[in-house]
Image (tube, rainbow, N blue to C red):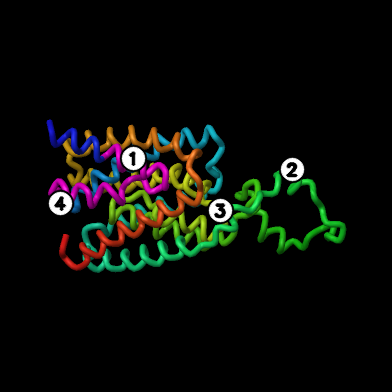
Amino acid sequence: MEVGLLMLGAGVAAGVFGSLLGLGGGTLIVPLLTLAFGLPVREAVGVSLVCVIMTSGASAAVYLEREVANLRLGMVLELFTATGAVVGGAIAFLLDEHLLAGLFTVMLVYVSVSMARQRQAAEKAPAIPSDEATNATPTDAPSEPPPAATRATTAVGRLSGPGYTVRRLRFGAAGSVFAGILSALLGIGGGIVKVPLMHLAMGVPLRIATATSNLMMGITASTSAIVYLARGGIDPFVAAPTAVGVFLGASVGSRMAHRIDVRILRWLFVVVLLYTAFQMARRALGIA
C-alpha cells in the first residue's frame, strides 16, 4: 500500500512536468522506477509508455480547447512518428542498451545546449496579426506565382499558424521517425525530440510545439505499448498507481501552462534534458 502511494506521488510529479514540457513524463518515470523502486529497466519502459498515454489524453483536450496546438501539423508528423514506433518496437530487444544510451546522451546534451543558447528575442517579438498577414499583398508581387513555387509552399503553408511559418517539413518528418524509434526503445513519448525539432528546426513557437507534442504522444506511446504488452513487459500492479498519478498531474500541469512565462518553460525544458542525459550516461556506463 505504501509503495503504491509513493508510485502515485511519483506519477503526479512526472505528470505535471510532462504536461508542461511536452515530454509525457517518460523521461522521469523510467529512471525513477528503476533507481527508486528497483524495477528492471525494460519493465519501467513498459510502465512509462502507459503513463505517456495518460499524459497525452489528459492534456490534449485542454490544449485543443484553447487552440494552442497545431492539430494539422501534429497529425502529419504523427504518421512518421507512429512508423518509427513500430520499427523501434520490433528492434527493442535486439539493440545493445548501453550503446543506445550513450548515443542518446550525446543527443540530449546537444539539444539542451542549443535550447539554452537560443535567443530570447524571438519569444518577445510581437506576432503579426493573422488578418494583417492574410490581407497584406505586396504591390510588386506577381499576379500568378510560378507553379513550382506554389507546389513547394502550399503544403507547408497549410500547416502554419498565426504569426509563424512551418519550414523544413521533410526534415521534421525524418526527425519524427527517429522520435518514434526512441519512444519504443526508451519509454518516452518522443516529445523530447519533437519539441526541439518543431521549435528549433521547423520554426514553431515553443508553447505551440509543446502543445502539439502532447497531442501526438498518445498515439506514439500506444503503438509502442502494444509491443511491450504482447511480450509481457508491462506490470499492471506498477502501471496502475503510476498512471493514475500521471493523469492527475497532467491535468493540473495542462491548466498551469498558459500562466508560465515562456522563458521559464524553456529553462525547465533544459533542466529536464540535462537530468535525462545524466541518467542515460549512468546507464551507458553500467552504473545504473
Q: Earlier in the sequence, mark 1 or mark 2?
A: 1
> Residue 151: percent from the left, percent from the top?
68, 59
| Residue located farthest toward the right when viewing the structure as drawn | 139
Q: Are marks 1 and 3 in contact (CB under 8 Å)?
A: no
Q: Earlier in the sequence, mark 1 or mark 4?
A: 1
Which residue is denoted by mark 1 in the rendering? Answer: 15
**In the image, which is nearer the foreground, mark 4 or mark 3?**
3
Which residue is denoted by mark 2 in the rendering? Answer: 131
The span from disc 2 to disc 4 (Cα, nearest Å) is 54 Å
Which residue is denoted by mark 4 in the rendering? Answer: 40
- 271 or 52: nearer the eye? 271
| Magenta highlight range | 11-39
- 137 or 249: nearer the eye? 249
Q: Which mark is residue 94?
A: none
Compared across the picture, whether 3 is left or right of 102 comes to left
Q: Earlier in the sequence, mark 4 or mark 3?
A: 4
Above or below: residue 225 compared with residue 273? above
**Residue 75 in view (yes/no):** no
130 in magenta: no
Q: Amino acid at mark 4?
A: Pro
Q: Earlier in the sequence, mark 1 or mark 3?
A: 1
